[in-house]
Image (cartoon, grey):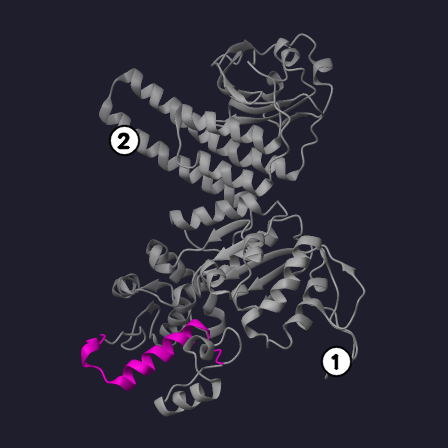
Amino acid sequence: MKAKKARGESKTLDPTATLRSIMEGTAGASGEHFFRSLVQYLAASLNVKSSFVAEFNPERTHVRTLAVWADGQHVPNFEFGIEGTPCKRVLSGAIQHFADDVQQLFPTNEHLRELNARSYLAIPLTDESGAVVGHLASIDDKPLAADERELSIFHIFAARATAELIRRHAVRQLDDSRCREQRLRIGRKRMEAEVAYLREELRSRSDFSEIVGESDVIWKVLRSIDMVAPTESTVLILGETGTGKELVARAIHKNSKRSNGPFIRVNCAALPESLVESELFGHEHGAFTGATQQRMGRFELADGGTLFLDEIGEMPLPTQSRLLRVLQEQELERVGSSQTIQVDTRVLAATNRNLLDMVDEGAFREDLYYRLNVFPIQVPALRERKEDIPTLVRFFLQKLAQRLGRSIDSVAPSTLAAFQEYTWPGNVRELENIVERAMILTHGNTLQLPNGVLPTRRPKKNAALVSLAEVESEHIRAVLAHTNGVIAGPQGAAVILDINPNTLRSRMEKLGITVER
């Protein structure tokens, strides 16, 4: 294997940036383009000298590479006999890892010698019958101790490479038969089998039991979880209210190295501004009125585990400054104390608001935004994944059966049709509530949808034909919805409306506007 230039003195890439690059570089690709992208990003993520993907000949005596990345560039494919190479051991069907001194183990292998190889890591690629058809490998001129993150990357992309090899073999066979109609039909089946294979591989290795759905947008979320969970990176989970952002956070925790540690959730919107720092960072006895004893904060409680900051957009600006320091330094002081406490806590955050807009408005720190937005995951609204509604409905029927004492094993077609036509502003949470309501009202074992269970939206009036009081009322309601009912404070509705909080409360009382708590 002859490389044209030596590898540069580049630093190891940021794990999160690399994982995101792998997803972007290989998603949707196929054939030669996929394999070339795969080996390039694999070498970059592991910071190794060379990576390649190869397939065995039918007799399992030779290997031909499908893409090779060495010393910072793609190099031409080549073929070689497997005798005297670590590639031969891949035929056993097990991962082959030689952490150091690989040349001493295979002294006649000229490719290892040309690369000045010290370490070798390979994973077999198998066909539908379980036979080894190829392998994905990385070679380096320094020792390589494969950790969980590296093996996770190998498993994920070995599964994708396997599916691509199966697809290539199918197309090759059909090209030989020159049957275009059959090629299209079987090609479609192969692609379906590829998707099923990848999804089964992901499900079998990960705990996503609480996230229900088979749509492409949900599987994009699951792939993102699987990629980022083994790392220590901060994750920002984005999505509307009721989409399941907390489920995503729990799945990241369960599939991480911290799964045996605590998972602590903090709802930033539910904490009074005067107590939020005490809740997060703890306080000493006498730190403020009512502090009758020392108390650990949520960061300390989550030490060795994961802290989930839900509705991070509602966090007051002063607390944002302290949070930024904890994220950067992994240390804090309790309220009323000057003693520094070290913590080992991974932070996941979620919001239904546009934090960049809040940055522009001065309501959210820009430096904190970029510190949180290392690896964003967008959770889709239910209206964007309506094909998942039948699966979700059946899941909720089983989940609610014991609590309600009802056994409903089927759903009326008209009910499913109504569910799929509705826009679901409350998303999955609203769907669960409506399924529960419908179960209570249903007679028999087939879920029905009595009138009034599914909300109906009143048509909007022509703006030119409504009264001034109606316009004012609608505007105040919209602002209150934006602030989640918060009236006073730097992020409250009164600031947005530019009026005194007491004046706003008076207007609300006059217009009959109430805020649910």
Magenta residues: mostly which secondary structure? Answer: helix
Circle count: 2
Residue 491 horizontal side relative to residue 294, left or right: left
Does label 1 or label 2 sit earlier along the sequence? 2
* Residue 139 x/y as whole percent: 62, 22
Residue 158 horizontal side relative to residue 305, left or right: left
Magenta-drawn stretch contains 139: no
The disc labelled 1 sits on which kind of residue? Ala
Residue for badge 2 = 185
Secondary structure under badge 2? helix
* Residue 183 x/y as whole percent: 28, 26
Residue for badge 1 = 291
Residue range (magenta): 459-487
Magenta-drawn stretch contains 485: yes
**Residue at far right of view:** 339
Is 430 placed above or below 156 here? Answer: below
Q: Nearer the viewer, residue 445 or 207?
A: 207
Residue located 69% across and 72% down the image: 278
Is 493 placed above or below 129 here? Answer: below
The disc labelled 2 sits on which kind of residue? Arg
